[in-house]
Amino acid sequence: MIKHLNITVQGKVQGVSYRATTKAVADQLGVRGLVRNEANGDVYIEAEAEPMLMEMFLEWCQKGPDAARVSEVITHEAESKNYRNFEVVKR
């Protein structure tokens, strides 16, 4: 069963390679979806994966890359969109 989460990551998460590293981790774990910067400084992620892989992905989102300082990760379950891969979306 595939789980879909909409994830908002808050803190010092822009300008620290958060999106690129998120893609690398997602590709490694087999997570599909997208990541993009938001105008307010947050990073927004839509992720789809098996529950155990999603748990590992969320654990990584709590830390992010070395230069990031994550203050909060907010998740909401949603309908699956059947993503085929994981993309970095430019705003």
Image: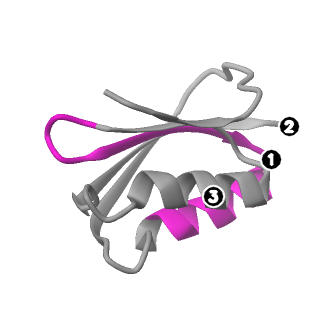
* Side of 59 where 44 appears, left or right: left
- On the image, the x and y values in percent for residue 22 come to 53, 56
* Side of 11 where 51 appears, left or right: right
For the point 56% across and 69% down, which residue is it? 59
Magenta-tinted stretch: 38-61
Q: Amino acid at mark 3?
A: Ala
Q: Are marks 2 and 1 in contact (CB under 8 Å)?
A: yes
Q: Quadrant of the N terminus?
A: top right
Rendered position, 77 above or below 80: below
Marks 1, 3: nearer the viewer: 3
Give the residue furthest to the bottom. 66
For the point 56% across and 26% down, which residue is it? 78
On residue 50, which mark appears?
1
Rendered position, 4 above or below 22: above
Marks 2, 3: nearer the viewer: 3
* Side of 28 where 88 appears, left or right: left
Rendered position, 65 above or below 26: below
- Identify the residue position indicated by label 3 in the image: 24
Q: Nearer the viewer, residue 55 or 89?
A: 89
Label 2 or label 1, whichever comes before in sequence order: 2
- On the image, the x and y values in percent for residue 23 come to 59, 51
On residue 1, which mark appears?
2
For the point 67% across and 19% down, which residue is it? 81
Q: Secondary structure at mark 2?
A: loop
